[in-house]
Image (tube, coloured by chain):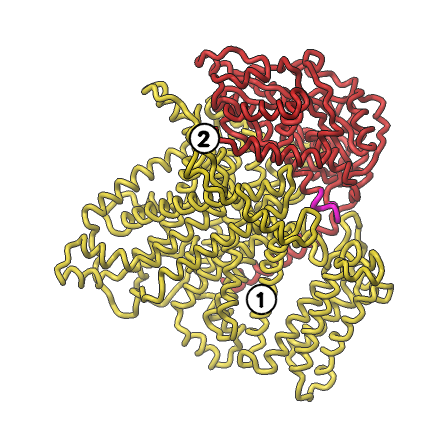
Amino acid sequence: MKLKKTFAAATMLAGTMTALSFMSAGAAQAQGELVMYCGVQEEWCRAMTTAFERETGIKVSMTRKSAGEVYAQVKAEAANPRADIWWGGTGDPHMQAAEEGLTVEYKSPKMSELQDWAVRQWEQSKQRTVGIYSGALGFGYNTDLAKSNNIAEPKCWADLLKAEFKDEVQVADPNSSGTAYTLLATIVQIMGEDKGFEYLKALHKNVNQYTKSGAAPAKAMALGETTAGIAFMHDIVTMVVDKAPVKVVAPCEGTGYEIGSMSIIKGAKNMDNAKKFYDWALTADAQKLGADAKSYQVPSNKSTPIPPQSPKLSDIKLINFDFAKYGSSAERRRLLSKWDNEVKNLPK
Amino acid sequence: MSRATLGWIVLSWVGFALLPWYGFERSATPTIADYFISGSALVHGLRGAWWLLPILLPLGMALVPVVWPSSQDRGSWLVASGAVGLALIVLQGFTIGLNGWTMDVLKVFGDPGPHQAGMGYGAALTSASFLIILCHGLAARGWCRGDAFVTSSIGVVIALIIVFVFFPVSTILASAFADNSGNFAPSEFVTKFTDKSIWGLDCLTSDLRCGVAWNTLFLGLLVAFGTTALGLAFALIATRTEFRYKKLLRVMSVLPIITPPFVIGLALILLFGRSGALSSVLWEWFGIPRSRWIYGLPGVFIAQLLAFTPIAFLVLIGVVQGISPTLEEASQTLRAKSWTTFWTVTLPLMRPGLANAFLLGFVESLADFGNPLVLAGNYEVLSTKIFFAVVGAQQDQGRAAVLSIILLAFTLGAFWLQHAWLGKKVYTTVTGKGDSGIPLPLPRRVALASYLTAIPWAIFTVAVYAIIVVGAFVRSMGRDYTPTFEHFVTAFRVEHADWGLYFSGSAWNSFFATVKVAALSAPLTAAIGLLTAYLLTRQRFSGQRSFEFGTLLSFAIPGTVVGVSYILAFNVPPIEITGTGFILVMCFVFRNMPVGVRSGIATLSQIDKSLDEASLTLGARSSTTMRRVVLPLLRPAIVASLVYSFVRAMTAVSAVIFLVTAEYNMATTYIVGRVEAGEFGLAIAYSTALIIVMLLAIVAIQLMVGERRLGRRSASAAPSPVAVQAVP
């Protein structure tokens, strides 16, 4: 009989609790809450969340996802949005969401404190997304492995095609990673589309693995799983700071960059808190948290101290990246399927 | 009119006239008034939501037998009321959506038309009441010998399966036939289905890659063969030899089941990766060059072997133990050599076990998401491909649906083949007659073969787990072996803030959510599973076979497909539950229910039906019989399904990766994120914590449910039912 009661009680308890969680779907606390989709590294997301919670007492429910995952989710939920703010992650999906009207316009009082590139992106997106940091694309190599295999220091994109890098380059798959899409768009802009795809096909022979996440090649380099890896330079710097035998390279032909962005979701349930977070996230104090969390992007607020480890944007030959063209969904889909058909399925 | 029927009629009115019909907006703070009356369907209906008013008709029809209890055809009134009520609710729910009419045809009545939110408590209660009223009516008309409990149970289980299995699965299958903007386009399906990247066979003739379908199939077959062979070797050693460390084998068999699946993949990288521990040793001592061979088919194959061999072992050990020694003795008496006996008697008797083990290995390999994600490199399989078709930059849901159909076809094909192979032969060896023989020792070459496969494999498993433990406590595995608690601090830090304890560790959120969801779904899974098992074994009703098939379906569908289909089906009204804990619980309940059903059926078929009949003869109703006679005898099955569903809820990846939200993040998706970002230490530390929680939970479940006490002098040597039960 004890069994019967325990079992019945457990089932009923579970039933009630399930019903309650059903309810919490609709009836979560209105005040003091913010649902955030975060698109950068976990540590930084956590640091932002806790700092904002400490400062305001607003409870932040944060989910970290890659930029593509956040975009997919925001789009799937468009009829009935679940998130309030989408903070961080490469700018393309933010621009795409702005284009599709998934996010709303907002003019923060902090706009005057921002760098030009951040304001420009905000204008291009019809005030729907704003730059919070930027980082240049580059590559790195593991100095130990390079030395033991007698590989000369690579300096340019072209160096990665050398035979000595056969099976030694790692880069993400642009279908799943915004970083790799930035590479695709950068190469096409530097070399022109035909030459660019020739380059990518040649690079394919040296690529040992297309990872799913954009920062994974940086980690693989640090572990010695690959000699060279293409990623955002700040991701590689994180490894260098962690005392990994890795060197960062700013390619001599010039390189593209990303603008990490922030948008408010259309139909946000906690709109006031989202705006509060938006304003706060643009302050120098909030942007300083990145460097503490070992993320060395260049912050968008002019008065934020640029972390000494950050690759100086002034030392890098940046191309005039056409975010409007290469951020549009049509161009993106075309380039991706072209890459899928012409590059990814090539024999090694 | 029974009091129960009356109660449900009252509840149907309560749901309609008192409780809030719609779910609350998340931003709203409902007052007491919102909970009662003012949000009810009646009020909404009078205030302009005219489509809710027709529901009053079936509500009134249910009252007819109450007002005229002497009426002859009260059963028919109840049936009509329930059926009309359900039909009306479904009709209005699916035609009127969040932003107006859901079908273009209806736009002639005005565009965008009326709109409504998802179902709330009131709608849920009224629908449930109509269902029960319908079932009571059917019972009154003589179905199932007039037993209202049985008809209601059947009705509830069928309704749940329709809502949480058939409805979402059909949604995703439908999107395979639509183009990117959602229009019906069968030609798209043909193009996507015949795509070269799915069915290409280039790898046979050149060094190009083969299609993802062939990759998946090939890997599945390899893993199924491998796990069955290894499982058999372990099972033979455990039952038929004098091996000294059998206890250790049992422990090792449980360990991989409670290990978050991708952790094994991770450990393999740390061992065999180019800078892995073993690779370093091989390079420094023997000059064997480091390579990247682990990324690809070999890596996934080894990881899946490690993860799924225990399942094969647990299936086969029961079968090997169950083989009656008398048959073998007969063979020996007839002068067969021990090898001949093994080959012609023992092995054929194991066929059902071998087939089950093979099937499980195949299905698990197909559904596995974590290991391919970590290790597959450029070897693509369906489960990860489906995932990136949805979240990748191309955003092609139709493609995901097409790939899902292929995956589903493989799984169902495997089930069908297994049935065909086993055929109608009789494998019964456990009978009531005494069989007091002693199992024969293994023929020497079989024993030798078993030892040679099993022991190196066991050592390998130990090495992998050693890496996992070490990895949790060093700074960065493979690079920096400084001992540290850093990872545990990052994950599980607790700070003391002004206003109390502050769980600032990055893992707490997902940890609490995971434990909550797992603890909620386990008893529900057990309850629904065992109820279904009871209906299948103890009751006779038409359509029983298709009912049984329906309960199995959710097990056969790979997790990735379930995840996508849930988000497609439940993100919009009428059932709008994405982003809640409820959807996670439901997902787990229906993913894991078949295990409850299977272990319930297995246990129930051992219990003589005369016990129930005695109870019924003495005047107990079937619900009482179930509670007081059947349930206490079902303890082993309860333990099995509780343990399995709890563990699965904590370790499942593929199904939940789409369903997690900020509020309900799951441990496994958090860990996958860490692994993807290369933070192996943190991932491993978190997994270690999860393994400990699961061990504690298993012990707690055992203590809570307790042992089944049968009035027998000596317990039989039958193995306690294992967490993973074979699916027939």
Q: Which of A263 and B470 is in front in this view?
A: A263
Q: Is A110 situated left or right of A336 in this image?
A: right
Q: Is residue B464 covered in magenta?
A: no
| Residue ID for mark 2 | B269
Quarter placement of the N terminus of chain B: bottom right
- Would residue A261 be visible to someone looking at this image? yes
Residue type (three-letter) at the residue carrying disc 2: Ile
Q: Quadrant of residue B162?
A: bottom right
Q: Nearer the viewer, residue A221 or B252?
A: A221
Rendered colour, chain A: red
Position of B163 relative to A224 (above/below) = below
Quarter placement of the C terminus of chain B: bottom left
Position of B563 relative to A171 (above/below) = below
Q: Residues within 10 Å of mark 1 (few under 14, many from 20)?
A: some
Rendered colour, chain B: yellow
Q: Is B145 situated left or right of A96 in this image?
A: left
Residue B174 percent location from the top left of the image: 63, 55
The residue at the point 73 percent across, 34 percent down is: A328
Residue A263 percent location from the top left of the image: 76, 34
Chain letter, disc 1 residue: B
- Would residue B469 be visible to someone looking at this image? no
Residue extent of the magenta highlight:
A75-81
Q: Is mark 1 on a helix, strand or loop?
A: helix
